[in-house]
Image: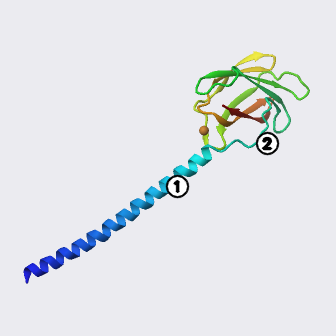
């Protein structure tokens, strides 16, 4: 009698364990599938070609038309994974150099959802509307945008440059 009860009990435990294990396996399988799909989507996103209608001009009018800005990256081609400096030239739309502007720099990869690995800064005014940008670094090839916010004489404006790095 008691042995019969014990074996019934252990059969019940075995069944419960079995269904718990099955659930754990299904759960694990789902996690693996979600992670695999996540990686696949990320891979596809990371390997998208840049849009083919990108404006790659190195001289652009700021968004509100207050300034005309020109980027002069310190090396050609722009290096990957190496700190380098740029010069940013800022002038008025009619070509007069903009002196003593406050300028901030930012950048990111629109297709990757990450930014620059550094915080580049304008460290020096070089004269004639030229500003030294230190700390530029791109950690991979692909489509980058670099944004400058320029404030001079109380007028703030932004400009975005597109880069496609090899
Ligand atoms: Cu990236």
Q: Which mark is residue 53?
A: 2
What's the residue at 48%, 53% (across, down)?
A: 35
What's the residue at 44%, 61% (across, down)?
A: 30
Q: Position of residue 155 (x, y in %)?
A: 81, 33
| Corner quadrant of residue 99 | top right
Name the element at disc 1. helix
Q: For ligand 1, tell me if the residue under mark 2 lies within 8 Å.
A: no
Q: Which mark is residue 37?
A: 1
Q: Position of residue 166 (x, y in %)?
A: 66, 31
Left or right relative to 17: residue 71: right
Left or right relative to 3: residue 40: right
Task: Categorize mark 2 by other alpha carbons within 10 Å: few (<14), some (14-19), many (20+).
Answer: few
Task: Categorize mark 1 by other alpha carbons within 10 Å: few (<14), some (14-19), many (20+).
Answer: few
Q: CA distance from mark 2 to mark 1?
A: 30 Å
Name the element at disc 2. loop
Quarter containing the N terminus: bottom left
Q: Which mark is residue 87?
A: none
What's the residue at 49%, 57% (across, down)?
A: 34
Q: Where is ligand 1, by quadrant?
A: top right
The answer to whether any part of residue 112 appears in the image is no
| Corner quadrant of residue 124 | top right
Left or right relative to 20: residue 73: right
| Corner quadrant of residue 132 | top right
Q: Position of residue 104 (x, y in %)?
A: 69, 30
Q: Does label 2 or label 1 sit earlier along the sequence?
A: 1
The answer to whether any part of residue 81 appears in the image is yes
């Amino acid at each position: 009698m008691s042995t019969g009860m014990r074996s019934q009990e252990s059969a019940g435990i075995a069944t419960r364990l079995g269904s718990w294990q099955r659930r754990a396996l299904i759960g694990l399988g789902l996690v693996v599938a979600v992670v695999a799909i996540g990686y696949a989507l990320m891979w596809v996103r990371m390997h998208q070609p840049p849009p083919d209608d990108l404006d790659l001009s190195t001289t652009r009018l700021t968004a509100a038309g207050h300034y005309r800005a020109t980027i002069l990256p310190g090396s050609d081609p722009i290096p990957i994974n190496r700190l380098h400096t740029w010069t940013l030239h800022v002038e008025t739309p009619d070509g007069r150099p903009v002196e003593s502007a406050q300028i901030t720099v930012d950048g990111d990869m629109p297709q990757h959802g990450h930014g620059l690995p550094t915080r580049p800064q304008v460290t020096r005014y070089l004269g004639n509307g030229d500003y030294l940008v230190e700390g530029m670094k791109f950690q991979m090839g692909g489509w980058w945008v670099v944004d400058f916010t320029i404030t001079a004489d109380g007028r703030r404006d932004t400009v975005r440059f597109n880069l496609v790095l090899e």
